Image (spheres, rainbow, N blue to C red):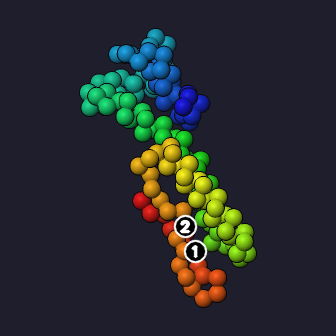
Amino acid sequence: MGPEDFVDPANRAIFRALTEDPELDRAPEGMEAVAAGRLAGLLASSEETGHAARVLDDSARRLRGAPLAERARELRATIARELDPERKRQLISELEELQRKKREIDPSHWTPAVRHRPGPGEGTVSTEERP
């Protein structure tokens, strides 16, 4: 995870400051006012700083998993529309691989890729996500 993973410029600046000085107790000289204010609020909250490593790890997992989650949503929509059984199986395999990668990033994540429901003909595929 790096500063480029943060969309918000203030959060990016805070990340940079904390990685440059993990023992930081105030905003560094020259930090933009919004970022400095946000950092001051984080540093003032003993509850947040008491478990900062866990919060940072959780945030990093979410950031790394976001592109996988987006691709999984796209695949589910495509699977729901796909008529060719062979292509559908390929898409399901790709979705299952994405879910495996997501579990590697976040071992507490568990979502079945797809759930097959037998039905007339080829059957149907549920594209529901489960927590």
Q: How many marks?
A: 2
Asked if labels 1 and 2 touch by Cβ distance under 8 angstroms, the answer is: yes
- Looking at the image, residue 128 lies above or below residue 22: below
User: Along the horizontal axis of the image, is 121 left or right of 84?
Assistant: left
User: Along the horizontal axis of the image, is 80 left or right of 102?
Assistant: right
Residue 28 is situated, as x and y percent measured from the top left of the image, at: 44, 13
User: Along the horizontal axis of the image, is 29 left or right of 77?
Assistant: left
Q: Residue at x 51, y 45 (%)?
A: 104
Of 30 and 105, nearer the camera is 105
Q: Which residue is mark 2?
A: 114
Of 79 and 18, nearer the camera is 79
Label 2: few (<14), some or many (≥20) within 10 Å? some
Residue 58 is situated, as x and y percent measured from the top left of the image, at: 42, 39
Q: Is residue 10 visible?
A: no
Q: Residue at x 67, y 68 (%)?
A: 89
Q: Is residue 3 visible?
A: yes
Report, in whole angstroms, how far the alpha carbon at label 2 lies from the one at label 1: 7 Å
Q: Which residue is mark 1?
A: 125
Q: Amino acid at mark 1?
A: Val
Question: Disc 1 on helix, strand or loop?
Answer: strand
